[in-house]
Image (spheres, helix red, strand yellow):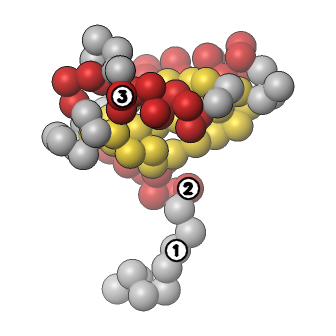
Amino acid sequence: MPVFVYILRSLKDGSYYVGSAQDVNSRVKHHNEIGTQYTKQKRPWELVYTEEHPDRSSAMQREYAIKKHGGKQFIESLIKKSRPINKDEVP
């Protein structure tokens, strides 16, 4: 069963959260309703990025790599690359 690496953006302060789960939709719902120690104080969250991986091990390695690169710029570059370019948004 595939496992997804996901990135959430806080609508409260614009911060990011990186995680992994088999069911991303239920995980996002959990972050928004119950939260974790980090996410409950920054609700609500929106899903802004996902990557599919064949197993938990590879997903966790990728999650760690994203966190290790760290920084808002790196995460925003991943998000930007993943979205199709809208010709109306091109300067």
Q: Position of residue 91 (x, y in %)?
A: 34, 85
Give the number of the disc on residue 85. 1
Q: Nearer the viewer, residue 70 or 32?
A: 32
What residue lies at 43% left-to-right and 20% top-to-bottom? 68
Q: Give SS at disc 3.
A: helix
Q: Is residue 17 left or right of residue 21?
A: left
Spatial distance from mark 1 to mark 2, Cα to Cα?
A: 9 Å
Return the residue at label 3: 33
Taking 28 as reference, is 76 above or below it?
below
Q: Identify residue type, mark 3.
A: Glu
Q: Residues within 10 Å of mark 3 (few under 14, many from 20)?
A: some
Relative placement, left or right, of 2 versus 51 is right
Q: Number of labelled discs?
A: 3
Identity of the residue drawn at 25% across and 34% down = 43
Residue 71 drawn above or below residue 49: above
Q: CA distance from mark 2 to mark 3?
A: 27 Å
> Residue 46's spot in the image, x, y percent?
38, 45
CA distance separating discs 3 and 1: 32 Å
Residue 4 position in % (x across, y down): 65, 32
Q: Which mark sits nearer the N-terminus, 2 or 3?
A: 3
Q: Which residue is mark 2?
A: 82
Q: Residue at x 53, y 35 (%)?
A: 6
Give the residue drawn at x 42%, y 88%: 88
Question: In the rendered structure, which amino acid carries the disc numbered 1?
Answer: Ile
